[in-house]
Image (cartoon, helix red, strand yellow):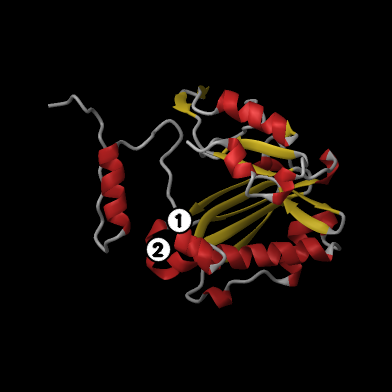
Amino acid sequence: GEKFSDIAAKYEWLAKDNKGVIKPDQLIKRRGKLGLVKIGTPADLEAWFDKTANSYVKVGQTEGRLHTFIVEPFCAHTENEEMYIAIYSERCRDVIMFYEHGGVDIGDVEEKARTINIPVRLEDGEMSITEREIDVLLGPCKENEAIRKFVRNLYEAYKTLHFTYLEINPFVFTNGRIHILDLAAKLDETANFLCSDKWNGRNASARAARSIEFPAPFGRDLTSEEQYISDMDAKTGASLKLTILNRKGR
């Protein structure tokens, strides 16, 4: 794998010895509770990465190897600034949930969050959040114009990019800006022909360098054969799938 120092050299904020956060990026929930989030200086992050990378951890009943990480600048804030929002799709509607007290200790969000439902229409343009709905959704935060705009734009991005699930916990509004601190999302893979260019990156160089990846679940690394078929599947209109259940089976 890549060395932390080689990656850090490409980013100015890390070179300036600013505080940052590192955590695995492998479809693992509740990383903070599992001790899989490290906050500190670039030297602290590098030491933690060297110790943690390629180690095995158990999450629930699943054991897997930690091999992919995300590093981001640390956003100073207080716990009472942390908020929660989620959007997910059902057969006949999109559901948007919001709670002004997010974070790792949010508890049963289904019981606490306010919810609005957007009925599915033939045209995405007909699916929007009304002023009354956003007032209900945001509750005590409804007067914050930045949060209102963020929620509207987030839902537009959700539709445009064909997400089926998008959860941000937490995000914060501090110093007049929205900061997303942790996010989980699912894309509709069958929409690849519609928006592959949008998935690939924000600019031409990013698109040329890297396409979207659909990673295997944590603890389920693809074998070389499965990866080969997956790569073929991404290049053809046909559907090609391979899962090896027992390599020694007959």
Q: Is residue 50 left or right of residue 38?
A: left
The percent coordinates of residue 86 (x first, y second) are: 63, 51
Give the residue type that dot 1 points to. Answer: Ile
Q: Quadrant of the C terminus?
A: top left
Residue found 70% across the figure and 38% down from its top: 21
Residue 124 in the image: above or below residue 57: below
- Which quadrant of the view contains residue 193? bottom left
Residue 52 against residue 180 in the figure, above or below: above
In the image, 30 versus 12, the foreground residue is: 12
Q: Between residues 199 and 20, which one lies in front from this camera angle?
A: 20
Marks 2 and 1, how far apart at CA: 9 Å
Location of mark 2 (residue): 192
> Disc 1 designates what residue?
212
In contact (CB < 8 Å): disc 2 and disc 1: yes
Q: Is residue 220 left or right of residue 57?
A: left
Residue in view at x 73 percent, y 58 percent:
137
Task: Answer above or below: position of 179 versus 193.
Answer: above
Q: Residue 57: x, y in percent?
A: 52, 23
Where is residue 165? Give x, y as percent: 54, 53
Query: Which residue lies at the image location 84% right of the left edge and 43% below the top edge?
Result: 77
Quadrant location of residue 211? bottom left
